[in-house]
Amino acid sequence: MAHTLVEMMFASAILMMVVGALLAAHMIGLREYQLVDSKAGASDTSRTILNQLPADIRAAKMWKIGNGDDSSFTPITSGSAQQGTALRLFSTTNNSTPYVQYYFDLSETNNSNGKLMRFTSANATPVCLASNLVNWLGGGYSFAAEDYRGVVASDATAYKNVIHTRLQFCKYLYPLTAVGTNQLYDYYKLEFRATPHLPE
């Protein structure tokens, strides 16, 4: 059975519409995948932090909040607000070793990729638990000691205080897609409190 030119044109037009619809659906699926990938990465980071950090805090018998990195630590003295970028946790009442230290690393030159690092006195090689931190936007501290009312403590020896951890993240909402001049970011905050073990 012979086909006319008009029938061929209609068939081609319908085929082109179907192919266009399939391509559009595929592109939407890719964009949604990028969004889910970003959210899943955030969830994985949160899970890692919430597994490790609260467990270390609860196991600590002594702690100090201060500022430092993998090679130094300066504790906040009594009389000053117990807020800092580093947290040192001691598993015994001995104030020296062994200990676990967390610190907020801003070694990136543009401060856009702060990292939460962890190391122990037994293994001084820092491990990155979280990246894309922008705590410097909201006061610059990651750790604070608070009393039961949520008031920041000023006594460095009050071991009954609660350790308040605040991590602010900033990630590309669509990691592979540049949107606008400054890109499109997804901002979220992870905030929790944990109580250390009281010294024996």
Image (cartoon, rainbow, N blue to C red):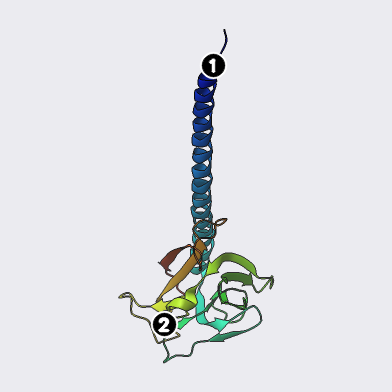
| Residue in the foreground of this view, choosing between 19 and 156 | 19
Horizontally, is 32 left or right of 154 in the view? right
Decide if residue 28 is in sight here.
yes
Query: Is 107 rendered above or below residue 167?
Result: below
Residue at the image point whose x is 49% and y is 87% from the top: 76
Residue found at the very far bottom of the displayed protein: 79
Horizontally, is 124 left or right of 151 in the view? right
Q: Position of residue 143 (x, y in %)?
A: 47, 76
| Residue in the foreground of this view, choosing between 185 and 90 | 185
Residue at the image point whose x is 48% and y is 66% from the top: 169
The amino acid pointed to by label 1 is Thr
Disc 2 or 1, which lies upstream in sequence?
Answer: 1
Q: Position of residue 114 (x, y in %)?
A: 56, 72
Q: Residues within 10 Å of mark 1 (few under 14, many from 20)?
A: few
Q: Which mark is residue 158?
A: 2
Identify the residue under disc 1. Answer: 4
Decide if residue 196 is in sight here.
no
Q: Secondary structure at mark 1?
A: loop
| Residue in the foreground of this view, choosing between 6 and 116 | 6
Residue at the image point whose x is 55% and y is 14% from the top: 3
